């Protein structure tokens, strides 16, 4: 049976089926409303992890009918790799930060294009002037149409993100975890809210290695017998988290040059290059984020020192037998 894109069609179809109903749903970009519609019809919904469902990924013949049959088979055998299903509030927070990151990247792209126009015209401009709303308006005096169009787009993007910034600030104030993460140098409100939206509850990760794999900060591994090969970074990961952690790592190295995270990045950068240094910095930063979320304590730049042995706690001197 072929269903349309309407949720009501799915609900009506499920209600015609007798007995208890189980639905296997692949975690695609539109899984949320299908998941909620099936749950409202009284079905038990299992969200499938698309990268781990090898029976579908390795199939030589791929079609919707073949994929559906494979999902049903794995569900019947209780062998379907599942994905985490966040609650409604977390889903809304994830949509919010994704939209804000989208507009942030758009803003950066337009700014770089406008800088290129200025550079191509031989105009001497102040560094970072397009990121300052009041200062960049002075560029209109140049009378360059390409630059004026870029300024118009930047103004439109600034207006579109004002409400998003207010919503993110409100989410930051409601989240104790985000406020703890913001104590790390280089992590602001937006980065802290993004980490909370995709990492919490942190208890769903059984270990730090599992969390690192989810963020894409560990290499892919191919092993056969005694031979093992470590390749590029994992592709099946949360790319938004990896990007955020790398950017936050650079900011942390600028703001806290003597911290453990910065030392790891510099040491790795000298030995393996700047790109590998950035990844190792992000990995060290993620380890700190994991510890803060697990312990519920703010960031400490250095490990707490052990208390010194005072005179009151020192052992009394042994009596002399002379």
Image: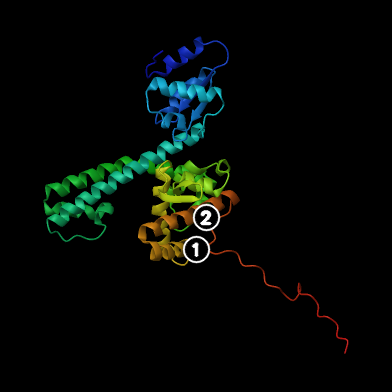
Left or right: where 245 falls relative to 143: right
Mark 2–mark 1 Cα distance, whole angstroms, equals: 10 Å
- Quarter of the rendering containing residue 265: bottom left
Q: Are marks 2 and 1 in contact (CB under 8 Å)?
A: yes
Please provide percent x and percent y for residue 218: 46, 50
Quarter of the rendering containing residue 272? bottom left
98 in relation to 230, above or below: above
Q: Position of residue 146 (x, y in %)?
A: 14, 47
Residue drawn at x 12%, y 47% is 145
Q: Is residue 272 left or right of residue 127?
A: right
Q: Which mark is residue 288?
A: 2
Q: In the image, is residue 56 above or below residue 306?
A: above
**Outermost residue, bottom direction?**
322
Vertical side of 98 occupied by 3: above or below: above
Place of residue 238 in the rendered image (x, y in percent of width and height, measured from the top left): 43, 42
Q: Which mark is residue 260?
A: 1
């Amino acid at each position: 049976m072929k269903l349309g894109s309407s949720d009501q069609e799915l609900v009506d179809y499920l209600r015609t089926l007798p007995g208890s109903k189980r639905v296997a749903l692949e975690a695609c970009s539109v899984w949320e409303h299908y998941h909620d519609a099936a749950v409202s019809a009284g079905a038990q919904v299992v969200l499938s992890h698309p990268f781990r469902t090898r029976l579908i990924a390795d199939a030589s013949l791929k079609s919707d009918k073949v994929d559906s049959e494979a999902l049903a088979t794995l569900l019947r055998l209780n062998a379907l790799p599942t994905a985490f299903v966040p609650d409604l509030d977390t889903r809304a927070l994830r949509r919010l930060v994704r939209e804000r990151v989208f507009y942030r990247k758009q803003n950066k792209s337009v700014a770089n294009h406008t800088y290129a126009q200025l550079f191509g015209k031989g105009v001497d401009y102040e560094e970072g002037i397009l990121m300052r709303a009041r200062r960049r308006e002075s560029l209109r005096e140049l009378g360059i149409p390409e630059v004026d169009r870029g300024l118009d787009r930047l103004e439109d993007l600034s207006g579109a993100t004002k409400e998003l910034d207010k919503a993110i600030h409100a989410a930051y104030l409601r989240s104790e975890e985000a406020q703890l993460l913001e104590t790390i140098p280089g992590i602001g409100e937006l980065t802290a809210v993004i980490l909370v939206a995709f990492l919490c509850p942190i208890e769903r990760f059984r270990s730090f290695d599992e969390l690192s794999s989810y963020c894409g900060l560990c290499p892919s591994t191919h092993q056969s017998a005694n031979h093992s090969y470590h390749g590029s970074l994992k592709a099946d990961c949360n790319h938004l988290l990896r990007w955020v952690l790398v950017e936050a790592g650079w900011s942390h190295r600028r703001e806290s040059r003597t911290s453990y995270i910065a030392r790891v990045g510099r040491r790795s950068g000298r030995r393996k290059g700047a790109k590998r240094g950035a990844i190792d910095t992000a990995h060290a930063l993620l380890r700190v984020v994991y510890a803060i979320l697990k312990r519920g304590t703010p960031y400490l730049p250095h490990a707490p020192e052990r208390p010194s042995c005072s005179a009151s706690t020192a052992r009394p001197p042994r009596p002399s037998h002379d």
